[in-house]
Image (spheres, rainbow, N blue to C red):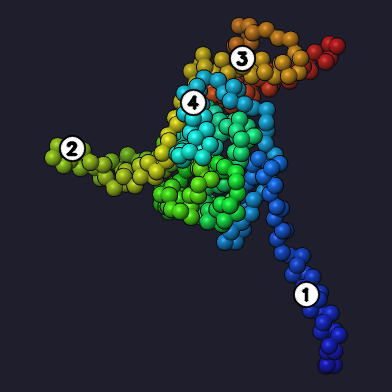
Amino acid sequence: MAEMSTSDFMQRVVRFLDRYEQNLPPVPPAIDWHRVYAARWVGQGGGGWLKPLEIDGEHSLDDLVGVDRQKQLLEANTRQFVEGLPANNALLWGARGTGKSSLVRALLNAWKDSGLRLIEIDRDELVHLPALVALISDQPWRFLLFCDDLAFEAGDSAYKTLKTVLDGSVEATPDNLLLYATSNRRHLLPEQRSDNLGASMVDGELHPGEAIEEKIALSDRFGLWVSFYPFSQDHYLEVVRHWLTSMADQYGLQWQWSEELQREAIRWATARGNRNGRCAWQFARSWVGKALLEAAREG
């Protein structure tokens, strides 16, 4: 076999390096927080990077109808945080589609001009929190770390990472970072009937078992609990009317509330088995869209 020349060897090395560079992950974009109001944490290896997000600035706090108590609690807590005052990590829990995630995003819209920024993070990426903190700890902005639909299954040890985060170590919770999480579960973990078997009576007092104590311990680390409840029919119809008014005004559509329209809205919710804000918004989009299409055909 002919001996490889130095030139051939160097050419092979160059080709190998070219292929290697092509397989490298893309260089993460630099975040300009003056123009970017929200980002998503993308885990990568032992760390990750922030992906800029386009936010929907149309929905405001006024669009959340019938949850005044919840808005008041979160607005006050967020104002404290934005102004550099003590504030609590918050758990928004309750029925699906009742405005938990929408409230967090509306708070961003309300406070983004005052320095509030939002970072979305999946539950499984919480282990990368030190890397995330390293990217933002020296920034002048106030960051809401938003974990949507947070929940853990039985035997899932990942929740221990979250407990560590919420315990308030210096590295995990810098001054400019606050965690807001939403969940359908009050204690973030499934609660089984068998959990109560570990309860005991001590001097006439009922003491919960270790299984229940462990589950309650996680949610207890959130300083603020905000509960959301299923909508009554009147509440649902109030939200329907709000969205119909908002969307009709946006497109210049003339409309009028009627018993027939109310029956349509109720049938829509019954068919989906849900009576909540998301369902009301979807009905309004469907009805307004059809009305606009009919008006265009008639015109």
Give the labeled residue for mark 1.
16
Quarter placement of the C terminus = top right
User: Which mark is first along the chain, 1 or 4?
Assistant: 1
- For the residues carrying marks 4 and 3, which lies nearer the camera in this image? 4
- Compared to residue 187, the image places residue 30 above or below, namely below
Residue 103 in the image, given as x and y percentages of width and height? 56, 30
Disc 4 to disc 3: CB gap under 8 Å: no
State the CA–CA distance, disc 2 to disc 4: 36 Å
Q: Secondary structure at mark 1?
A: helix
State the CA–CA distance, disc 2 to disc 3: 50 Å
Give the labeled residue for mark 2.
205
User: Which mark is first along the chain, 4 or 2?
Assistant: 4
Q: Measuring 68% from the left and 22% from the top, which residue is drawn there? A: 285
Query: Label 2 sits on what residue type?
Result: Glu
Q: Measuring 68% from the left and 33% from the top, which residue is drawn there? A: 56
Query: Label 4 sits on what residue type?
Result: Gln
